[in-house]
Image (cartoon, rainbow, N blue to C red):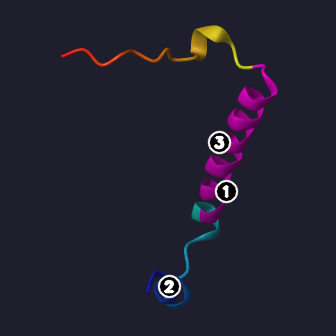
Amino acid sequence: MRMKRWVQNPPSPRRVKFIFGIILIAAIIFGVEYAGYWPDWATAERMGRRF
């Protein structure tokens, strides 16, 4: 359904670049974290469940 809508009314090139930019930033952050270069101050600590 959504693909049909995109074919009939495609997004603007600006929006496509914006979406790919967001995906690229997320991939870079994932790569930096996976490689072990993510700083400790930017890592959230898991907290136990307390009620």
Residue 31 shown in magenta = yes
The disc placed on residue 37 is none
Amino acid tagged 3: Ala
Could you tell which of marks 2 and 3 lies nearer the N-terminus? 2
Where is residue 32 shown, x and y percent of the image?
76, 29
Residue 36: x and y, percent? Answer: 78, 21
Which picture quadrant has residue 42?
top right
Residue 5 at x, y = what percent? 46, 86
- What is the crowding at mark 2: few (fewer than 14 residues within 10 Å), some, or many (at least 20)? few
Q: Judge depth for marks 1 and 3 and give the one in front.
A: 3
In the rendered image of this protein, does residue 3 appear above or below residue 24?
below
Camera-near label (2 vs 1) is 1
Majority secondary structure in the magenta region:
helix
Question: On the image, numbered disc 3 is attached to which residue?
Answer: 26
Q: Residue at x 49, y 14 (%)?
A: 45
Badge 1 element: helix
Q: Which residue is mark 2?
A: 9
Label 2 element class: loop
Relative horizontal placement of residue 28, taking residue 13 as reference (left or right) = right
Can residue 28 be found in the magenta stretch? yes
Q: Residue furthest left?
A: 51
Mark 1 Cα within 10 Å, few/some/many (few <14, many 20+)? few
Which tag, 2 or 1, sits closer to the chain's start?
2
Range of magenta residues: 16-37
**Distance from Cα at disc 1 to Cα at disc 3:** 10 Å
Q: Nearer the viewer, residue 31 or 9?
A: 31
Instruction: Compare residues 39 and 23 and report the one nearer the observer.
Output: 39
Q: Is residue 37 above or below residue 8?
A: above
Density class for disc 3 (Cα within 10 Å; few <14, some 14-19, many ≥20) is few
Q: Residue at x 64, y 10 (%)?
A: 40
